[in-house]
Amino acid sequence: MEDHREHALEELLEALFKAREDGHTPIDPSILPLATIPSDAEMKIFIERRLLNCHHGKVDLTPEGNAIAELLVRRHRLAERLFSEILDLNDDGLHSTSCSFEHVLDPAVTESVCTMLGHPPTCPHGKRIPPGECCRESRREVAPIVIPLKDLPVGSNARIVFITTPYHQRLSRLVNLGVVPGGRIFLHQKRPSFLLRLGATEVAIDEQIASEIFVRKVE
């Protein structure tokens, strides 16, 4: 019973976090996409634990509840990125597998997965991955599988995983050139500029842009 209650709580907290991201809280819990709606007794327990606020039948996260929810969402979205990039799972199995995985990742493993993936800012669906301590410290103890393009050896084939440039015009230019997540490239040279081959097209970029493009080396 306790395991069921904790699972229901985690599902509720995660759903409320996502609703808050979209600006939809406080919200009636009955309209949240939950497999099981918590009972009134369970909701009372969650409120007494200071994880939820309730007013006129609508609920929202307390700071304590938000902290737990953020960790759950971080694990879920990192799991999606892991299974998408490493195991090439498609959307059919991605969500359900990640839902199970998020409940078993402990903090140390979560940080290692994040580091291995190069501290991705978003999940495969473009949703923000809440950063952890490893992101703030740019920790590199685990050899990352996803690396900045500037660190890719010359003569390597790679697949673009994500792009982190904050400049919309720069991103638009890259997209127009065909430099997009999922695209395959060959790094021909790094000096005097980075020269990428995308199929029959060659694209030259500078080192700053190369540091904002994250790739996974492929054979």
Image: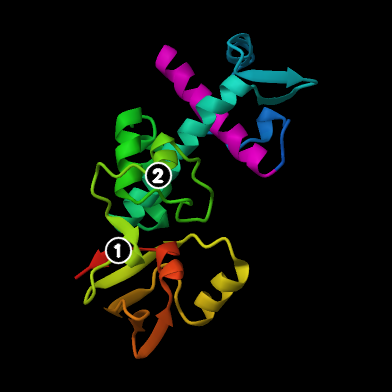
Which residue is identified by label 1? 151
Q: Callout 2: few (<14), some (14-19), or many (20+) C-alpha neighbours within 10 Å?
A: many
Measured from the top left, where is residue 20 in percent x and y? 66, 37
Q: Is residue 86 left or right of residue 164?
A: left
Q: Identify the residue at the far left of this view.
A: 219
Q: Is residue 92 above or below residue 155?
A: above
Q: Count every numbered label the image shows and give the total.
A: 2
Residue 123, image x, y percentages = 46, 51
Asked if disc 2 and disc 1 are in contact, CB closer than 8 Å, the reply is: no
Residue 90, percent from left and from top: 37, 58
Indicate which label's residue lies in the foreground, 2 or 1.
1
Tell me how far mark 2 sits from mark 1, CA to CA: 22 Å
Q: Residue furthest front?
A: 192
Instruction: State the image quarter where residue 134 is shown.
Output: top left
Picture quarter with the C terminus: bottom left
Q: Which residues are magenta?
A: 1-22
